[in-house]
Structure formats: C-alpha cells, structure tokens
Image: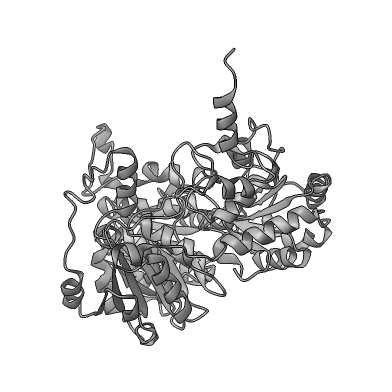
C-alpha cells in the first residue's frame, strides 16, 4: 500500500467512512485513494471551514470521529475555526492535511526562508494550541504509528481534535501491507478511584439540606447520560443544566428545572443562587454560566466540581466556597451512582424548587407580537419544536438565534447542540450537513441568523447536490441582534456595523439560484407543519423585527439571578429566600450611617 491508501483504509476501519474534503494538489493522492477504496466515500464541501464544522457534528450525533482531508496552505488554515469548535467542546475529530514534498521544504539548502514549496505553511505549529495532538510525518515508516497515536489521543481522556500533516512524498511511499500498530493513549493526570469519588460526594452531601446537581456535557461525552438521568429522577434530586448538557436527557423529567447562565432560565439561576450544596458533573463552569462576576456564582453554597481534566479544577482553588474538585473519569460514573447516598432535602427546599419550576420553567413570556406586530422567535422555535419528529437532530448557531433556541426548545428525544465554547457565526449550517450525511433516516433542523447565514452560504450547493433532508431556518432580525442589544446598553444605541453598514441579500432569490425550496414567514400562522413534513432541503426565512430582544439577559457586573427585564423587588426577594440577596445588600450599604 502507498501511504495515501493506508490512510483511506485506516479511516474506513474506524468508521469514518465518509470524509469531508476539498481537493488540492498537496492532498490529491489521499483523495484519489479514498475514491478508490470500496468502503469509503467522500463529500465535497465548498469551504474547508464548513468541512471542519461538519466533522465536529459526528461525535455529537453518532459517536463517530469526523474526518477531513484538505490541501496545504490556505486549505489547512481554513480548518482552524472548525478545529477550535471541537477543541473547546471536547469533541474528537481527525484532520489530515496534505503538505509539500519534503525536498521543497522550509530551510531549503540551509536558508531559513518564509516559504519554499508552493502553498507551504507550518500548519502543525499553528494548531497546536487548539488540538490535543498535531504532528507532521517526516518518515513514511512512522505513518502507521502516528495515525494510531493521533486517533487514540483524540478519543481518550478529555477528548478533542488532532491533526496529521502528511507530505506528498509520504503519501506516495510504499508502506507495506495494512497492519495495526498498537498505541494506547495515557493522560498525564491519574483519575480518582471510584471509592474515593464516592467518599467525597457522600461527605459533601452529608450536612446540607438544599442540594442541587448541575448536569454538564461531560456526562454525555463520557456515555453516562442515561444512567445519570435515571439516578436523578429516582432520587428526586433537583437538577439544572449547562447548554451543552441539554442534549443528554429528557426535559420532561419532573425534577429538571432548566438551563443556567447569562441567558438561562430565571428559575434555574435562582436555584443555583439558593442551594447550599451544588454538585457539578462534567461542566467547566465558563463565564457564560457563572457570569463575568464569577465570584457571585452559587455564593450561598458549597460547590463540588467533578471533571476529567485536572486543569479545570485548578482554576477554582482560590474560590472559598469551592471544595477541592475531584478529577474523575465520568465514563465510570454509571457504575457507582447507586452507591451515592440520597442527599437530604428539607421540606422548605422541596417546596421552593417545585414552585420555582412551576413558575419559570418552560414559559415563553414575550410581548413582541403585541409590541411590534411581528413574530416572537421564542414562539416560532417552540412551534417548530412541536411539529418536528421526536428523534430530529437540531443544531443552533450563535448570537441571538442561539439564545432563542436554547431558551425555548424543549427536548424529548432530539439531539440538540451547538459549538458552545467557540460559538462561531456560521456553525449550524455546515454542522447540519455533517449530521444529515450520516443520518439519512432523521430529520435535521438548523437554526441560523441572517448574519451567520452569510458565513457559510456557499454550502447551499453541498446541501442541494447531496439532496440532504435539512430544514435551514433563518431567524432573520436584519442585523446582529445580540450586538445591537449590547450597543443599546453601552453605546447609546449607536448601531455601527449592525444596523448601519450591515447588509444582506434577498435570501429568496439567492436560494432559488441554488434550486432549493424557499419559504418566507412573516406571520406565525405561515409556519405550517407540512413545511417540515416534506422531504428534502429547504430554507425557511422567518422575518423578525430588527429590535427583537433576548429576554431574559444578564447585564455586565450583575450576578446570574438578577436578569433583565428586572423583576419587582417583592418577587425577587421571595425568589432569593435562602440565598445571598445582592439587591438588599446594596440597599443596606446605602442606608448604613457614615463613620
């Protein structure tokens, strides 16, 4: 086998049987080998960024490591945004980049030139900060070992993307018959033993009376979501979730109380701020969850974080209300859940969280139709939620459309996700293409914004050419709504580069040019179920008022329980029955006598 033929067969044997690519001179041998391998397919994208984002989908939907193949130089650098999505969300992907022949490389004849070979670029050093492993193959005898090593690293421990850069001479070299080279990836941190994990958690819950669990994406990435959901329901422990954790359980669970954070559910945020014991399972507690004022998060509670990545635990060392975290492999969680003692809940706490769930969870307060005479995006998302199949795949983009989707979508069996950590504009559409290619029997729904739509609009051709069953929904507020709202708060409503200077095409005419079905939605009644029942690609353009806001939303400097629009003091004080009440503290300081 040549090196290129070995690469194709290696990917086939690991289930990455449809490679997302754009061809080029430096990767042409690999593309040819994939095309000749009877067990392999490839999908041509129109931009390498879209290919990387599509690959990011596959572990989220199928537990398959998504693979890309691109050429050197601009082909490789175009992958970077998609690779970052996988890195920050702990998604395993493998990216194979072609490279120039080694006799054309940098340091040519001893001269340290910027570039020797055509389109030569040192992609390995560029992506090292956002990959678990990145390597250039300089000797064909190392190809088998390095591919096995990279793949093993991608799926081990805290998972993530890897990149293997392969010069053209290595692609053409004879590497012998196919053979597996064993490589077992080992993480540098030794995880806690199950017995130690149990002892810590049981001791943590021992003295509290207002327990709460935060369900993070790490539970699902580790494959422990089914058992964890069953354990929480059986023990009747109230729980909330991060946005990336929302895809791993049924939101109908009687003790699920909503997602938390800057744009989270009010009731869920109130629970975080009123509990006295918060067990965090597999969430890194980024500042979109804790807010920029991270020190105010769960201020009335003891917090215990469980994470496979010890570096994520180190960052809490200076927080006085955090216990020393537990570095634990959550893939072992299912086996020990039954041995966790059910935490005590006071009657007052049970009454509090059940009332909070009843009052705030699943509600869609919105005055948009009455105020502007236009559609509420929350109402539109909820209506779509009701008409699509329960096993649909739902992808959200970024900005305002992401907030509206995650604030109002009610998951039962659907797979719903976004690139939560990197959150680039234009993610949802190519991610939905990746999902649709590997899931021909499931309806795929992609939510995007009018700004995000223009980031990867070229891959309408990929959707059309492959006749993918994707419903691409544009929540169209004619500008970058989340930034407009920020500008209203902090720049006196000066909408530079959002309203002023921003433009968009006539999406209807553009979509027609690709030969794709288009629906313009200006009234909620136009959002009919038959649009989503029909097979095949379609774009649904939902017109919103340009001033449509994200509500609730946290403003800078505030803690997560005090979101805009602000609740009346009476309601707010009642909701902060057990926790530290920042509003009352401000009033107390104002009324204190001067010394």
Which residue is at 47% across, 69% downward? 16
Provide residue 137's location: percent of width, then percent of height. Answer: 41, 50
Number of numbered tags placed on the structure image: 0
Q: Residue at x 63, y 61 (%)?
A: 357
> Residue 37 or 497: which is nearer the viewer?
497
Quadrant for the N terminus in the image: bottom left
Q: Position of residue 545 (x, y in %)?
A: 28, 62
The quarter of the picture where residue 443 lies is bottom left
Res 17 seen here:
no
The relative height of residue 91 versus residue 519 in the rendered view (above or below) is: above
Residues 215 and 113: in front is: 215
Q: Is residue 245 left or right of residue 515?
A: right
Q: Residue at x 27, y 50 (%)?
A: 73
Q: Nearer the viewer, residue 5 or 64?
A: 64
Relative to 533, does residue 10 appear above or below in the rendering? above
> Taking 240 as reference, is 471 left or right?
left
Q: Which part of the image, by quadrant, shows the C terminus?
A: top right
Image location of residue 51, percent across then percent down? 35, 63
Q: Can you say whether 513 is above or below 402 in the image?
A: below
**Horizontal and vertical percent for residue 61?**
50, 69
Outermost residue to the top: 595
Q: Is residue 344 left or right of residue 65?
A: right
Q: How is the image coloured?
A: one colour
For the residue pair 394 and 192, the one nearer the viewer reads as 394
Could you tell me if residue 355 is visible in this image? yes
């Amino acid at each position: 086998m040549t090196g290129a033929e070995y690469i194709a067969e290696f990917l086939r044997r690991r289930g990455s049987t449809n490679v997302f690519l754009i061809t080029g001179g430096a990767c042409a041998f690999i593309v040819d080998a994939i095309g000749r391998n009877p067990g392999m397919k490839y999908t041509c994208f129109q931009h390498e960024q879209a290919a990387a984002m599509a690959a990011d989908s596959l572990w989220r939907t199928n537990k398959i490591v998504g693979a890309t193949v691109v050429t050197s130089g601009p082909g490789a650098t175009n992958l970077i945004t998609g690779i970052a999505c996988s890195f920050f969300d702990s998604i395993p992907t493998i990216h194979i980049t072609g490279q120039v022949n080694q006799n054309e490389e940098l340091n040519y004849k001893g001269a340290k030139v910027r570039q020797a070979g055509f389109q030569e670029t040192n992609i390995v050093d560029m992506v090292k900060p956002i990959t678990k492993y990145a390597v250039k193959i300089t000797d064909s005898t190392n190809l088998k070992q390095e591919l096995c090593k990279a793949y093993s690293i991608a799926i081990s421990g805290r998972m993530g993307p890897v990149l293997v850069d392969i010069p053209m001479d290595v692609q053409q070299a004879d590497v012998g018959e196919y053979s597996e080279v064993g490589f077992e990836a080992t993480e540098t941190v030794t995880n806690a033993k199950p017995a130690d994990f149990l002892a810590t958690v049981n001791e943590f819950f021992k003295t509290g009376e207002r327990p709460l669990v935060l369900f993070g994406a790490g539970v699902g990435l580790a494959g422990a979501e089914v058992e964890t959901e069953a354990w929480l329901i059986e023990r009747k422990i109230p729980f909330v979730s991060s946005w990336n954790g929302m895809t791993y359980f049924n939101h109908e669970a009687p003790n699920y109380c909503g997602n938390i954070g800057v744009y989270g559910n009010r009731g869920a945020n109130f629970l975080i701020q009123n509990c006295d014991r918060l067990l965090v399972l597999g969430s890194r507690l980024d500042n979109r969850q804790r807010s920029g004022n991270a020190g105010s998060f769960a201020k009335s509670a003891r917090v215990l974080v469980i994470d496979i990545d010890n570096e994520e635990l180190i960052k809490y060392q200076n927080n006085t209300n955090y216990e020393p975290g537990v570095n634990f492999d959550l893939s072992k969680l299912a086996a020990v859940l039954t041995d966790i003692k059910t935490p005590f809940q006071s009657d007052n706490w049970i009454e509090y969280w059940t009332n909070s769930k009843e009052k705030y969870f699943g509600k869609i307060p919105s005055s948009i139709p009455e105020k502007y005479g236009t559609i509420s995006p929350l109402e539109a998302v909820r209506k779509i939620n009701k008409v699509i199949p329960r096993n649909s795949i739902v992808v959200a983009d970024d900005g305002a459309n992401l907030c509206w989707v995650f604030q109002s979508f009610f998951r039962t069996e659907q797979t719903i996700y976004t690139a939560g950590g990197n959150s680039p504009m234009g993610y949802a559409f190519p991610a939905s293409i990746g999902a649709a290619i590997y899931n021909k029997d499931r309806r795929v729904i992609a939510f995007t914004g009018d700004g995000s739509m223009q980031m990867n609009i070229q891959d309408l051709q990929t959707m059309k050419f492959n006749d993918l069953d994707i419903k691409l929904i544009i929540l169209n507020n004619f500008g970058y709504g989340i930034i407009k709202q920020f500008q209203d708060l902090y720049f006196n409503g000066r909408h530079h580069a959002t309203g002023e200077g921003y433009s968009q095409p006539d999406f209807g005419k553009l979509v027609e040019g690709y030969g794709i079905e288009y629906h313009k939605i200006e009234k909620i009644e136009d959002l009919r179920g038959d649009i989503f029942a029909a097979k095949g690609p379609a774009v649904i353009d939902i017109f919103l008022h340009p001033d449509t806001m994200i509500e609730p939303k946290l403003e800078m400097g505030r803690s997560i329980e005090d979101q805009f629009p602000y609740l009346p003091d009476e309601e707010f004080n009642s909701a902060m029955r057990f926790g530290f009440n920042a509003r009352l503290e401000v009033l107390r300081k104002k009324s204190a006598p001067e010394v």
